[in-house]
Amino acid sequence: MAEPDLARILLTAAERDRQAYDKLAADPDMHDSVAGFHAQQTVEKALKAVLARERLVFRRTHDIAELLDLIQDNGLSGPPYADCLDELNPYAVEMRYGLVEPGPLNRSGVAAWLQAVLCWARKQTGIQ
């Protein structure tokens, strides 16, 4: 698959996860682990879209910190909130499977992160 195609697929998937996050986060009865999973997935897929567009190889991982390091190591401009995005890592596995209980998720703050990261990814990839 050509890199621009993969980047577009990943960015589309990231947008869908963001939509899921928005709906789930708006429900006060929804557990943070469920909403947080889609937040983590949004960021992970947006980062991978940028890496794919740049033809950089990345492994199958849920580790946002690893993806951010790969972006930085290759001299790319990092996303907004890069210093705190890896706080979403536990929502990919540990919290999803009930291995740890999350603290309260700042739902409006995370929504701002997601919007900013997606805007950055669209700009980096040239995909609107």
Image: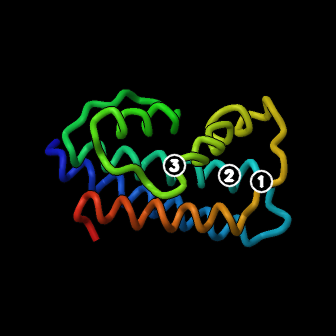
Q: Is residue 115 above or below residue 85?
A: below
Instruction: Say which mark, if any, is on residue 36.
Output: 2
Disc 1 marks a residue whose amino acid type is Asp
On-image quarter of the C terminus: bottom left
The residue lying toward the viewer, choosing from 65 and 48, is 65
Q: Judging from the image, what secondary structure is the residue with disc 1 in?
A: helix
From mark 2 to mark 3, how far is it between C-alphas?
A: 17 Å
Q: Which mark is in front, 3 or 1? A: 3
x, y (%) of residue 91? 67, 42
Rendered image quadrant of residue 114? bottom right
Disc 3 marks a residue whose amino acid type is Ala
Crowding at mark 3 (Cα within 10 Å: few <14, some 14-19, many 20+): some
The residue identified by callout 1 is 32
x, y (%) of residue 95? 74, 38
> On the picture, is 102 further left or further right than 44?
right
Q: Is residue 118 above or below residue 61?
A: below
The residue identified by callout 3 is 82
